[in-house]
Amino acid sequence: MTVSKKPRHFLTLTDMSPDELRALIARATELKRMHRNGVAHAPLTNKVLGMIFEKSSTRTRVSFEAGMAQLGGAAIFLSPRDTQLGRGEPIEDTARVLSRMVDCIMIRTFDHADVETFAAHSRVPVINGLTDFYHPCQLLADMQTFIELRGDITGKTVTWVGDGNNMCNSYIGAARQFDFHLRIACPEGYDPDPQILAANADRCEIVRDPGKAVDGSNLVVTDTWISMGQEEEKARREKAFAGYRVDREMMNRAAPGALFLHCLPAYRGKEVAEEVIDAPDSVVWDEAENRMHAQKALLEFLLC
């Protein structure tokens, strides 16, 4: 494979400018319209996406694989059992080999540094499908969902309720890139990364009381309290997050027309009440579908 220029990667939202992100989301909405209208669009014919999964996923695998097929390309699923990474091959060597055989690589793994190392030694674009630190593809879908239903998010108030995890870190980046104000409601000891928070202090604030954090918010977002790899902390985490469940009383404190998002899977009765996730102001199913459309726009951007 002949490579003429250094590839663009998508490891965090800051790998694109605000204008590029907005254009990508507009394109995702257009690709969604085309798909629903049965318009054939195959700009990635003969292109191959390699998908490395060290963390399992329903939405990430299906959205990338289906999206690649709809764009005329193909996707290869690689679990830890399917690569030499699981047998100790250096990340650098795997990157050098795979990037000579495929046109783009998506990685879903634990340590964010592993994705950065992979990208540094890849000859083709690398996409972060999730790490313990960031989940940028999900934020593309979340921003697309809000913008499609409520218009520009600039100047709006968004409230994150729950763990200061990879999604929370990514929402902090989104507050910077999309110019909204982010309130973060989390118990002490579960704050987002302090460096990310400090670098975006003009866009974000921590509000310990989740009800007050939601007051007047245009968008309320949560996630599971127990991510993959944290199962041993289940009892301790559930105790720490008591009072942080998004229920109808909490949503009633948000602004009129506020939306609820959750990247899924959701544990009903834990971080979100069933009455909320199934309510009309919950758009989690649109959000899940938009993973595919947003990632199609991203693949088109990186490969065309």
Image (cartoon, rainbow, N blue to C red):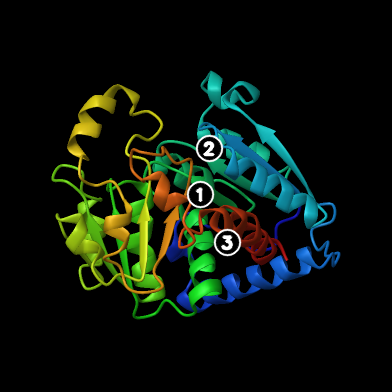
The three-letter amino acid code for the residue at tag 2 is Glu
Measured as percent of width and height from the top left, residue 82 is found at: 65, 24
Q: Is residue 198 visible?
A: no
The three-letter amino acid code for the residue at tag 3 is Arg
* Element at label 3: loop
Q: Which residue is mark 2?
A: 92
Q: Is residue 213 visible?
A: yes
Which is nearer the N-term, disc 3 or disc 1? 3
Q: Are marks 1 and 2 in contact (CB under 8 Å)?
A: yes
Residue occupying the point 57% across, 61% down: 8
Residue occupying the point 30% across, 64% down: 252
Residue occupying the point 27% across, 56% down: 249
Which is nearer the N-term, disc 3 or disc 2? 3
Q: CA distance from mark 3 to mark 2?
A: 18 Å
Q: Which residue is mark 3?
A: 8
* Element at label 2: helix
Q: Which residue is mark 1?
A: 120
Q: Which of these two is toward me, 76 or 188?
A: 188
